[in-house]
């Protein structure tokens, strides 16, 4: 295992919100360059917490976080890292805070020190790349749920990250938008961790799926696609299942 | 929730530099607010109406907005003439209306309507996000501008949250009445709304941190003052100066 390919290296991370039951319990985890990992697990198993710990939004009680070969302790260390790792929040209303779409997508690039003209170009290009051209001057809170999700994704991609962390990207989307996001994510050559309950989505977009339970990642429970004999409504009609 | 009914348009007023409009709106309102003479207030009202006409705003909707303020002023008309010291003008039963009272309340009516019309013509014709950026360029403190823009952005989200909660109460048969159960339920509603807003604020801050926010807020907008802005500024300042001279009876 070459160390320069090791992007995220968590060792014995423990975390709890208010001192009671640990949300992350001596968790160790590694992400190598090019890895595409899916995370599944019941609600409250610590998936979102794990992503927030990686981003430095939550500080673990114990354990070490190594990002891009450097140990990250304090806010300063994480600030440098956030340019390289993009996190998409579960609720797009948390992510989109500017009045217009263009301003929101340009927010990250502006923070990275780009000039307004450059930021505007980057934002427009990112929107075009996600098939969102014409959205520049739309008011963020008036977008539909699916549009909000796509624009949030644009705000993250506009920062040109090396790693993408997505928290339930397909939650609450209709089939069409879900397919669109799936296609977009399949086309990206980034290392990524996707949290999702949607196994179809994970099998399409990731090459490994880990399960999380009780604050631990169960590495030996790597999920393998397989088929069941099954019944469901309308089964008599000719149909296909996603692999 | 906040409908920007007047902000989009293509008129002389809409196309002016927002900073110029803000400055004119502020100076104009202050002068009108401190004026007491009708020989200044009447022309001021005319100026405000001209601004509305220049902005080509739908008259019906503007009138509708004026109704709210004038509803409030109507109460003053019932109160002030009878409570003000001065010469008797008319009597209603045992009540005596004074000349000074009537003059005072007329002044208030003129001023409120004039200022409101000017604000509608000058400020309501700026989209809120642009207004925020223009304020920043006029050296309004960053924190005040953020507060303004975030309030605008999230009041809608909080309102939706409120409606979800109200619906959740309603589908379980809640009917507001005058009793402890109702007060308690409303207190819970307000409480949970506060807690949720606080949580959301935390999440938004985290999302901003993830995108490299360090406390400085950059903006895309650049405004430019053009000839027509300067012409407009000059004409308006001259008009305001005229009002000042009318008010304080200054003659050249």
Image (cartoon, grey):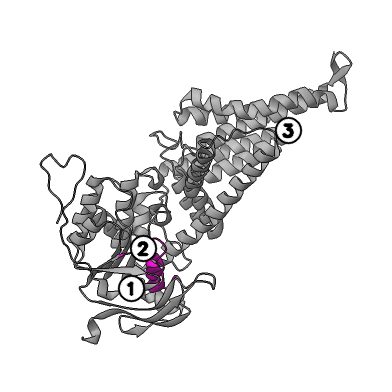
Q: Which residues are magenta?
A: A40-57
Residue annotated with mark 3: B36
Which class describes the residues within 10 Å of circle 2: few (<14), some (14-19), or many (20+)? many
Q: Position of residue A161 (x, y in %)?
A: 28, 68
Tell which of A59 and B108 is nearer to you: A59
Q: Position of residue A79 (x, y in %)?
A: 40, 74
Q: Would residue A234 be found to the left or right of residue B151 on screen?
A: left
Q: Position of residue A92 (x, y in %)?
A: 38, 53
Residue annotated with mark 1: A217
Which chain letter goes with mark 3?
B
Above or below, B82 against A111 in this view is above
Question: Which marked residue is nearer to the observer: mark 2 or mark 3?
Answer: 2
Residue A68 visible somewhere in the drawing: yes
Residue A136 visible somewhere in the drawing: no
Quarter of the image where one finds residue A33: bottom left
Above or below, B228 against A224 in this view is above
């Amino acid at each position: 295992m070459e160390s320069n390919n090791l992007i995220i290296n968590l060792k014995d991370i423990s975390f709890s919100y208010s001192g009671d039951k640990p949300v992350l319990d001596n968790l160790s985890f590694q992400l190598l360059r090019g890895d595409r990992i899916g995370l599944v697990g019941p609600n409250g198993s610590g998936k979102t917490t794990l992503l927030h710990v990686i981003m430095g939004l939550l500080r673990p009680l114990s354990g070490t976080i190594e990002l891009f070969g450097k140990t990250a302790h304090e806010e300063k260390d994480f600030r440098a890292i956030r340019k390289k790792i993009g996190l998409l929040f579960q609720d797009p209303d948390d992510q989109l805070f500017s009045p217009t779409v263009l301003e929101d997508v340009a927010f990250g690039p502006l923070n990275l020190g780009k000039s307004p003209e450059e930021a505007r170009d980057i934002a427009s290009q990112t929107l075009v790349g996600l098939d969102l051209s014409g959205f520049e001057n739309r008011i963020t809170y008036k977008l539909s749920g699916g549009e909000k999700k796509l624009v949030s994704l644009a705000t993250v991609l506009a920062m040109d990250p090396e790693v993408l962390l997505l928290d339930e990207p397909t939650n609450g989307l209709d089939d069409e938008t879900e397919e669109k996001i799936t296609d977009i994510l399949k086309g990206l050559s980034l290392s990524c961790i996707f949290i999702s309950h949607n196994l179809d989505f994970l099998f399409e977009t990731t090459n490994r799926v880990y399960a999380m339970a009780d604050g631990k990642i169960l590495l030996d429970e790597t999920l393998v696609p397989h088929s069941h004999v099954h019944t469901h409504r309308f089964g008599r009609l000719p149909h296909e299942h996603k692999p | 929730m906040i409908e920007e009914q007047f902000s989009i348009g293509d008129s002389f007023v809409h196309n002016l530099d927002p900073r110029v409009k803000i400055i004119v709106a502020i100076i104009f309102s202050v002068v009108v607010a401190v004026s007491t003479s009708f020989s200044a207030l009447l022309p001021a009202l005319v100026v405000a109406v001209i601004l509305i006409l220049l902005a080509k705003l739908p008259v019906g909707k503007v009138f509708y907005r004026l109704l709210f303020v004038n509803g409030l002023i109507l109460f003053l008309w019932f109160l002030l003439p009878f409570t003000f010291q001065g010469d008797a003008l008319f009597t209603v039963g045992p009540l005596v209306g004074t000349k000074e009272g009537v003059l005072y309340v007329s002044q208030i009516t003129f001023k409120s309507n004039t200022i409101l019309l000017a604000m509608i013509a000058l400020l309501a014709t700026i989209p809120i996000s642009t207004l925020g950026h223009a304020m920043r360029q006029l050296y309004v403190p960053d924190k005040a501008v953020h507060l303004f823009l975030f309030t605008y952005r999230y009041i809608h989200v909080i309102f939706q949250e409120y409606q979800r909660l109200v619906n959740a109460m309603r589908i379980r048969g809640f009917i507001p009445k005058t009793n402890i159960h109702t007060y308690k339920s409303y207190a819970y509603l307000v409480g949970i709304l506060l807690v949720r807003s606080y949580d959301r604020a935390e999440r938004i801050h985290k999302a901003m941190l993830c995108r490299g926010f360090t406390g400085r807020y950059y903006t895309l907008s650049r405004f430019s003052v053009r000839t027509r802005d300067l012409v407009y500024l000059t004409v308006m300042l001259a008009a305001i100066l005229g009002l000042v001279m009318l008010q304080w009876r200054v003659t050249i």
